[in-house]
Amino acid sequence: LNVRTAEESFGADLLIVAVKYGALQESLTLIEKIVDKHTIVMSPLNGIDSESIIGTKIGTNHMVYSFMKIAAQRVGNEITYNPDVTAGIFFGEKDGNRSERILAIQALLEGTKVHYHICDHIEQDIWFKFALNISKNLPQAIINCGYGAYTDSAHLAYISNRLRDEVVQVAAMKGIDISDENSSTGKNSDISPDSRFSTLQDLDAKRETEIEMFSGALIRMGKELGVETPFNEFAYHAIKCLEEKNCGKIK
């Protein structure tokens, strides 16, 4: 591995933040040591607030908004996925402008095996992905089932739809319309019926989940905006209970 310290990496042209959400706060000091005036920072984490968290530390002018769509399976220290059906990385300026730095990232990725998409409405697309994660990650994690259960069970589909409705309502209060359920950005790529998404994979491996980034963040925003989020509140506490069960706090 070609590894450098944060100090040795100061002045990098491009910094990609690819940590788990729980490690983001402790990464901020390292990020700050790497970033120079010209450094572009991309944070393709799940959720909707990593850019603002990083931007608060180093300045939002460094941030190019982005997200990933990838169906991967993590077992131990091995991650496997099918690159042929992986949508890849999505990025863009908040105003949709094909800026010099967007074109520079495009030139970097062009001709590589990395699938990429330049977005005209990146904030809306990030919220579409957020709604997808909440509505598909969380119900299967609670029930412990594969992706195919969303079409096999009307009950699971109902829970999924109500979770998504709450995301749509919060997004609308922020002036972002993600009501179109047929949007390609708000849908998964081809996924096998037995697929288990990241939250369930974390529970399977007895790891801490990213529920704070999903329902936790939505609940906080809902309270600030006066939007009730009962299904997300249930999902949040249910998954927190499963984490406690995994670590032996409850039996």
Image: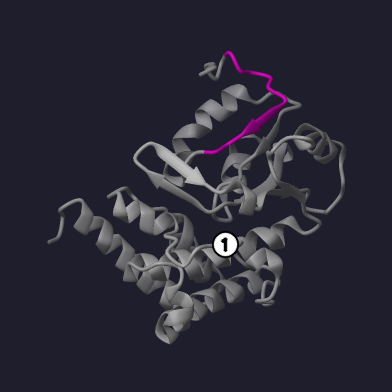
Give residue 26's quadrant in the image. top left
Q: Is residue 141 magenta?
A: no
Up the image or down, 34 lies above or below 64; here it is above
Q: Is residue 77 left or right of residue 168?
A: left
Residue 117: percent from left, percent from top: 75, 50
Residue 229 visible in rendering: no
Quadrant where the C terminus sits is bottom left
Q: Residue at x 15, y 60 (%)?
A: 250
Residue 186: percent from left, percent from top: 64, 67
Q: Is residue 163 left or right of residue 34?
A: left
Which amino acid is tagged 1? Answer: Phe
Q: Which residue is farthest left?
A: 251
Residue extent of the magenta highlight: 8-18
For disc 1, the marked residue is: 130
Q: Residue at x 83, y 53 (%)?
A: 96
Give residue 144's quadrant in the image. bottom left
- What is the chief secondary structure element of the magenta stretch? loop
Counting every numbered tag in the picture gives 1
Up the image or down, 79 lies above or below 155; here it is above
Q: Residue at x 77, y 32 (%)?
A: 108
Up the image or down, 140 lies above or below 19; here it is below
Mark 1: secondary structure? helix
